[in-house]
């Protein structure tokens, strides 16, 4: 059997997606969970799962450059086959993105290219969208703008609030993210000349099987 790929997971907060990845028991080797926030509950989840939990406390660095240098050093040392941004709330600098070209994916809570950046639930509700959802994409130097891999959508209900929309979107995320990671781990998914290939063919946007 082929050796499982090594994966580093970056988080900043609750880590519910991290938990979904752990619970999916994928044939991957999670080499570390790294957080810029020492209080992130995701670090506790990582420890509880027996994973290496690395806190790179942003506040202890003199500036953004120093922090990013430490992050880059840590990632280079781990040398993972895949870097997963799982609720990581900082912009990854170009040199790290370039180093891991085709090996870094992000999950974003909107139907990209709609609503990049923060406050996606508020924006969807304020703008009267009828649908919302989640997107997973390869990371490039364009914020939330890399080639899309998979999306899952839901209908916005007249009764929806930010909290209810978030809860329902995250339910979709918790199914879709492990699935995409599994596809990557099975070498079914790759980025070539900024184009996503699935089973060697240009991708039709993926969702999980209903
Ligand atoms: C997710 O909704 C993800 O789309 C966004 O940040 C959130 C992280 O949530 N990038 P969690 O930390 O996985 O609970």
Image (cartoon, grey):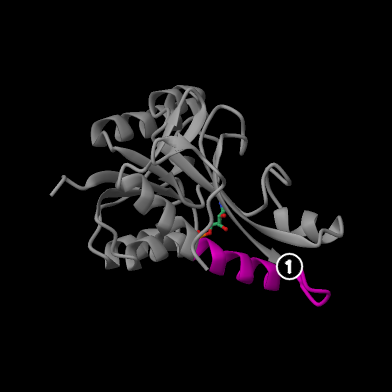
- Which residue does the image show at 46% across and 56% down from the upper left? 177
Task: Confirm or reject: label 1 Cβ below 8 Å from ligand 1.
Answer: no
Q: Main secondary structure of the magenta part?
A: helix
In this view, the residue farthest toward the bottom is 159
Q: Secondary structure at mark 1?
A: strand
- Which residue does the image show at 45% across and 22% down from the upper left? 95
Where is residue 39? Give x, y as percent.
44, 58
Q: Relative to the observer, which residue lies in front, 101 or 197?
A: 197
The number of numbered discs placed on residues in the rendered structure image is 1
140 to 15, vertically: above or below? above
Where is residue 180? Give x, y as percent.
43, 52
28 left or right of 208 in image:
left
Q: Quadrant of residue 158?
A: bottom right
121 left or right of 193 in image:
right
Where is residue 209? Give x, y as percent.
49, 64
Asked whether residue 14 is in view, the answer is no
- Which residue does the image show at 27% across and 65% down from the upper left? 49
Q: Where ligand 1 lies, by image quadrant?
A: bottom right
Where is residue 18? Give x, y as percent.
41, 59
- Density class for disc 1 (Cα within 10 Å; few <14, some 14-19, many ≥20) is few
Q: Relative to the observer, which residue lies in front, 15 or 132?
A: 132
Q: Quadrant of residue 109?
A: bottom right
Is residue 172 in the magenta section?
A: yes
Residue position for label 1? 155
Q: Quadrant of residue 43?
A: bottom left
- Which residue does the image show at 53% across and 56% down from the upper left? 207
38 left or right of 63 in image:
left
Is residue 69 in the magenta section?
A: no
49 left or right of 174 in image:
left
Range of the magenta residues?
A: 156-174
């Amino acid at each position: 059997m082929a050796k499982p790929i090594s994966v580093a997971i970056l988080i900043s907060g609750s880590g519910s997606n991290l938990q979904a990845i752990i619970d999916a028991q994928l044939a991957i080797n999670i080499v570390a969970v790294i957080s810029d926030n020492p209080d992130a509950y995701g670090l506790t989840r990582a420890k509880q799962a027996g994973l290496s939990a690395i806190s790179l406390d942003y506040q202890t660095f003199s500036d953004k450059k120093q922090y990013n240098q430490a992050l880059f050093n840590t990632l280079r040392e781990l040398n993972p086959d895949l870097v997963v941004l799982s609720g990581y709330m900082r912009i990854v600098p170009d040199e790290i993105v370039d180093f891991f070209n085709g090996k870094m994916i992000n999950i974003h809570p909107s139907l990209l290219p709609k609503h990049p950046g923060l406050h996606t639930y508020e924006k969807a509700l304020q703008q009267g969208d009828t649908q919302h959802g989640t997107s997973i994409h390869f990371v490039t130097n364009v914020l939330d703008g890399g080639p899309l891999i998979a999306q899952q959508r839901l209908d916005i209900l007249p009764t929806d609030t930010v909290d209810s929309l978030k809860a329902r979107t995250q339910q979709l995320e918790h199914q879709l993210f492990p699935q995409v990671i599994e596809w990557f781990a099975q070498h079914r998914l790759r980025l070539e000349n900024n184009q996503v290939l699935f089973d060697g063919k240009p991708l039709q946007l993926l969702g999980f099987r209903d």
